[in-house]
Image (tube, rainbow, N blue to C red):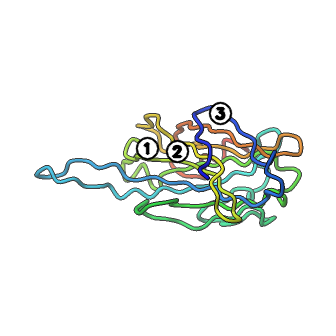
Amino acid sequence: MAGINLVKGQKIDLTKGNAGLSNVIVGLGWDPAESKGLFGFKKQANIDCDASALLLNADGKLTKKSNLVCFHNKQSACNSVVHSGDNLTGEGDGDDEQIRVNLSAVPADVSRILVVVNIYDAVNRKQDFGMIRSAYIRVANASGGAELVKYNLTDNYSGFTALICGELYRHGSEWKFAAIGEGSQAAHINQLAERYL
């Protein structure tokens, strides 16, 4: 069964009606856009995108350094959010990076899990998200892998070096997902994280 395709700004219940859903995979994917090279040959830029998760409190604040899960801190202190590791090129089909979330183990002081992607060394490499195509975020059931929701990021993100893709958030005792798709300027994940301190 295919998941539900969302558009920017849409929200959906994840756990309501999905009894027992506690472990999910947040998958992110992208491909480098092709550009015409010398003699008309197509070439792809080598762009290293990095997915990260920010575990935020009810005020939207990042209260602990360990609540930033990324390529240099692969799991939260509570082990409820775990990063799959760094994909340096974005080549190949399927998810380029994944973040596993055990919703039932997320600490009570975490209300939102913001999922972002930034381009590694974007300033030095003169790269931005205008050089990326087919970007998406999806949420799948970790048990069996069934896709629950998918959001294709179709806006023009030229000039942006970071994307705020979507978020998992608490709504009472349930978890929901919101499709955000917002471009941002941040040369490094730490710079983006500082905005939530």
What residue sits right under mark 2 in the picture?
162
Q: Earlier in the sequence, mark 1 or mark 3?
A: 3
Outermost residue, top side:
9
CA–CA distance in space, label 3 to label 2: 20 Å
Q: In the image, 121: left or right of 43?
A: right
The residue at 57%/49% (across/down) is 137
Q: Amino acid at mark 2?
A: Ala
Pinpoint residue 7: horizontal percent, then vertical percent.
57, 34
**Alpha-carbon neighbours of circle 1 within 10 Å: few (<14), some, or many (≥20)?**
many
Q: Hey, which quadrant is residue 92 in on the image?
A: bottom left
The residue at 79%/46% (across/down) is 175
**Alpha-carbon neighbours of circle 2 within 10 Å: few (<14), some, or many (≥20)?**
many
What residue sits right under mark 3 in the picture?
10
Q: Earlier in the sequence, mark 2 or mark 1?
A: 1
| Marks 2,1: beta carbons within 8 A | yes
Dot 3 lies on which element? loop
What residue sits right under mark 1 in the picture?
129
Q: Amino acid at mark 1?
A: Phe
CA–CA distance in space, label 2 to label 1: 7 Å
Q: Amino acid at mark 3?
A: Gln
- Seen from the viewer's position, the closer of residues 90 and 118 is 90
CA–CA distance in space, label 1 to label 3: 22 Å
Q: In the image, 77: left or right of 191?
A: right
Select label 1 or label 3 by which is in front. Answer: 3
Q: In the image, 139: left or right of 163?
A: right
Q: In the image, 145: left or right of 108?
A: left
